[in-house]
Structures are given as C-alpha cells and as structure tokens.
Image: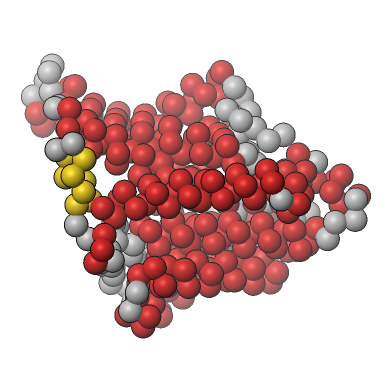
Amino acid sequence: MDALLLVEQGLNGLQLGVMLFLMAAGLTLVFGIMDLINLAHGTFYMVGAYLTAALVPVLGSFPLALAAAVLLTALLGLVVEAVALRTLYRRDHLDQVLATFGLILFFNELVKIVFGPVPIFLNPPAALAGTVDLFGLKYPAFRLAILAVGIAVAVFLWLLIARTRVGMLIRAGATNREMVMALGVDVRRLFGLVFALGCGLAGLAGAMAGPVLAVQVGMGEQILILTFVVIVIGGIGSIRGALAGALLVGMVDTLGRALLPAAFRLVMDAANASAAGAALASMAIYVLMAVVLAIRPKGLFPAH
C-alpha cells in the first residue's frame, strides 16, 4: 500500500470517527445523565438524513436544509422524550430497551410510508462537490467538511459543558443525579434539554452522512452498534471519552479493513486473503473494546 492510499484511509478513518462522535456525544449524555438506554438513538440519525433530503429541493440550499433538519430532529426528540420516554426513567433497563426498540419499528414504518422504501441519494452542495488537492492526494471536499463540522461541534460541546451553567448541571447530573434533584433543579427540563441536544446531534450526523451514504430506512441501526462500542470504550457520560472512543473506533475500523486484506495477501492467495482480512477487520473494534475494558473497566474517561 503506497503512502497516499494510507493517508486517504487515515482521513476516511477520521471522518468515520467524527460521524461516530456526533452520534456518541448525545447518546452518552442521555445514558450518563438520564440513565436511559435509548436504542432508538439511531432513528434520529435516519430522520435527520431524510429531512435533509426532503428539504434541499424546498429550500434550495443544503446548509439551510441541514440547519432546519437538525432543529426539527431536536424538536422531535423533545416530543418523544415528553410523550414516550418520561415514564421510563424509573423503570427497569429491560423496559427501556423494549420501549425504544418499539420506537425503532414505529419510525421505520412511518418513514417508509412517508418517503417510500427506495433509498434516496443526496448530492453534496455544489461548492463541496469537487476534490481538494492535499499534497498530491485528491480528497473529496465534502468529507473534509464533515471533519470541520465535527471539530466545530466538539469545540461547541466543550464550551457548553465546561463554561456554562447548563453545562455545569449536565456535568453534575452525569456524576450525581440525586444531588442535582436535591438542589431544586427542574430535572424534567434538564432531561428534555439533554435528550433534544442528543437527537439534534444525531440528526446532524445523519444530515452529513446523506451525501456520503444512501438515505434509507433502517440506516440508523447500522451505525448504532458502533456508537455503543464508542461510548463503552470512551466511558459512559463523558464527552471527552466519546471523542477519544470515536476517533479510535473510526481509525481501527477503517485501517483494519484497508490493511488486513493486504497483509494476508503476503501469505495466501488474493481470494482467501480478502475473505480472512474482511472477517478479522470486522472483529477489530470489538478486540479494541475488550483490550480497553481489560485495562480500564469503566472506559478511558468515565464521567462517574
């Protein structure tokens, strides 16, 4: 594998890591503060992608459609939290799993009714449709934009969590929820805000993924498994952990899929090397998770 291809795969790994961070940041806060296992988090990723695809022709602008989709996804999350999830906070985790799995089925069927079962292919904005020359490597401009958005969101979340009163309450809630309640904080409002923020970030991830992947029913479940791996590696309730875990998973998954088949070709024929490399690459992130948990059972940067 030449150096340019290795750099390209490294950038792809960073881009996947950024997408996973957008998903994991909201999910880890929801679980860390609300103690809610939300299997439907990937649903809001799907909703954000579909809303962006639907609004681009209406608004005539990808950035406007993206902003509107993120806002609408956050509002949808606020409604879902108030109507369907608020009664689950004191329930067993099994009840939460079953209820949020029901939300997955409901929204998948609703999206299929509204948009149809055929995947939608969303074009990137014209200004980002080309490539950028990075020292001889032609890399898609839109993928670089995803990296930039991810960095901007990470900085925004750091400022929100570290420098604002709301962030102080979120940190306190992730560390000691009972103390926050004892101080007289409106926990229902805090929970609604955190859930809406998480859904908005998932919607942003879906909107940014639309021009890279096909927008289709069930796309949220595909990324949800990786997202759970990220928050386990990073530490539940930790934004810093979500970022570190996402970048690790993104790099290991992408480089594993690129390098392992090539490595096996040195000792076996191409067909068997591709099969063996792909099989081991799909296991790489779980091996990474096992190693991290063996060294740090609560993850890299746990909030608790």
The residue drawn where x is 17% and y is 32% is 4
- Give coordinates of residue 297: x percent, y percent: 61, 24
Above or below 262: residue 196: below
* Residue nearest the observer in this picture, 292 or 240: 240
- Give coordinates of residue 176: x percent, y percent: 80, 41
Above or below 180: residue 241: above
Task: Please state, as top left, top right, bottom left or bottom right, where the C terminus lies in the image.
Answer: top right
Name, please, the residue furthest toward the bottom: 58
Q: Is residue 243 left or right of residue 86?
A: left
Above or below 102: residue 179: above
* Residue nearest the observer in this picture, 299 or 184: 184
* Residue nearest the observer in this picture, 175 or 113: 175
Q: Is residue 297 left or right of residue 263?
A: right
Answer whether residue 170 is visible to the viewer in this image. Answer: no
- Give coordinates of residue 77: x percent, y percent: 60, 66
Answer whether residue 79 is visible to the viewer in this image. Answer: yes
- Give coordinates of residue 143: x percent, y percent: 30, 50
The residue drawn where x is 48% and y is 73% is 68
Q: How is the image coloured?
A: secondary structure
Q: Is residue 34 left or right of residue 68?
A: right
Q: Quadrant of residue 48?
A: bottom left
* Residue nearest the observer in this picture, 232 or 190: 190
The residue drawn where x is 60% and y is 34% is 235
Q: Quadrant of residue 285?
A: top left
Number of marks in picture: 0
Task: Please state, as top left, top right, bottom left or bottom right, where the N terminus lies in the image.
Answer: top left
The residue drawn where x is 66% and y is 65% is 81
